[in-house]
Image (cartoon, grey):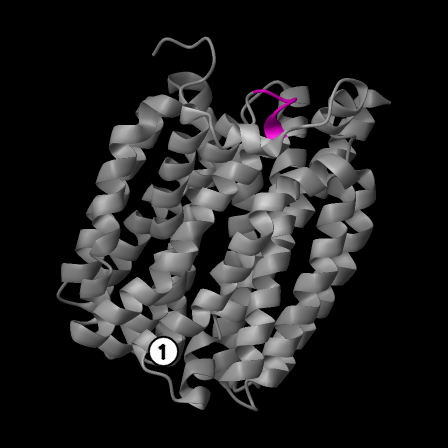
Amino acid sequence: MEKVGLRASTRSVYVTFIFLGIAMASFASRIPQIRDQLGLTPSQLGLMLLAIAAGSVTSLPIAGHLVGRFGSRVMVGTGAVLLGSALAAVAIGYHYGVVPVVIALYVYGLATGAWDVAMNVQAAVVERRLGRSIMPRFHAGYSIGTVAGALAGAGAVKVGVPVTVHVVIACVLVVAAVVPAVRWFVTDEATADAAATEKPRALAAWREPRTLLIGLFVLSFALTEGAGIDWISIALIDDHGTAASTGTLGFALFLAAMTVGRWFGPNLLDRYGRVPVLRMLAVTGLAGLLVFVFGPSTPIAFAGAMLWGLGASLGFPIGMSAAADDPVKAPARVGVVSSIGYCAFLGGPPLIGFLGDHLTVSKGLLAVAMLLVLSFALTPVLREPGRRV
């Protein structure tokens, strides 16, 4: 019965990751059309997207405490309903101007932050009970969702489905899938232990050097991933002169490469450990980014996007696993690491948008390269407990 229950919990975690990805990509795939409708420059678009990160950064510092208090089941279910409502508001509000979109994106960020922390805490519990590295495969589920959402978005753009119709349908599907799925979540170990001992102290995690360094590592990879999600289609359309549907396909290729890395990554992690694998991926991501920026043709840019996505694939999920190495302190530490990581989404869009106005969007993406070098240097802090190499 325990094995059956654990299998059901594993499937339910996959569902929550997949449908968060579908929600994100459904919106992201229509960013060019929303931008055109609102008449935004790259820097203005970056500032608008900043609302998402602002919402996430608002919720993340308290998300760990809320998960410890109410459990990941309640937080993911609530987050799904709030996120679906917010994206539906974006899809309707963009017809009326920037202000309703910014408000809705802020709420979307709030929901994403709470859902993300709770989902990763539950995934870490399941990973520990399974006794093997499966966190990247949960994140591969997220990437599968983003690929599905991006391909659906490319198809919707190609056949002329209105943004509002497309995004609202996606939101309904997300809520209908996630809310029933969370009932199979297992009890959060940290919640049970904390209730039996003492109340978690979230502020203490902000004073732990290792937790802060893991957060900085995750920030580097989050910006690498987020820059691709937000700007690859825009860069292909504006700088390479591709059609909107082709730009969206480049975005989908980036996400597909991330999915491959996350699905096959656990085998490499179990064999070689976190540090060597992450160093290899940081180099791969840097090479892909440079090929994308300096590639002379669209096919070469597509190849760069693929390498970029592969390199970005494991940083965030391994960072979550490393933050959750101690199950009792997992909610607080995952909350801290997520809060730091999401600062990439806070500063990334306006930074790249500003550089895009003064250079090009592609050249602006070079800012990501410096953080990939930093992430390479930080990999030792993610070493598994008890592992020497």
Quadrant of residue 271 in the image? top left
Mark 1 residue crowding within 10 angstroms, few (<14) / some (14–19) / many (20+): some
- Circle 1 sits on which residue? 44
The answer to whether residue 366 is left or right of residue 158 is: left
Foreground of the two, 35 or 46: 46
Identify which residue is drawn at 60% across, 33% down.
202
* Residue 91 at x, y percent in the picture: 60, 79
Q: Is residue 54 above or below residue 98?
A: above
**Could you tell me what secondary structure mostly forms the magenta stretch?**
loop
Q: Is residue 259 above or below residue 96?
A: above
* Residue 179 at x, y percent in the picture: 79, 54
If the image is split into quadrants, where does the N terminus sit? top right
Identify which residue is drawn at 47% across, 13% down.
385
Name the element at disc 1.
helix
Identify which residue is drawn at 22% across, 39% down.
373
Is residue 259 in view? no
* Residue 292 at x, y percent in the picture: 22, 58
The answer to whether residue 295 is left or right of residue 29 is: left
Q: Is residue 129 above or below residue 181?
A: above
Q: Is residue 261 magenta?
A: no
For badge 1, the amino acid type reads Gln
The answer to whether residue 185 is left or right of residue 282 is: right
Q: Is residue 328 magenta?
A: yes
Q: Is residue 163 above or below residue 350?
A: below
* Residue 328 at x, y percent in the picture: 65, 22
| Magenta residues, start to end | 326-330
From this viewpoint, which residue is outermost toward the right? 1
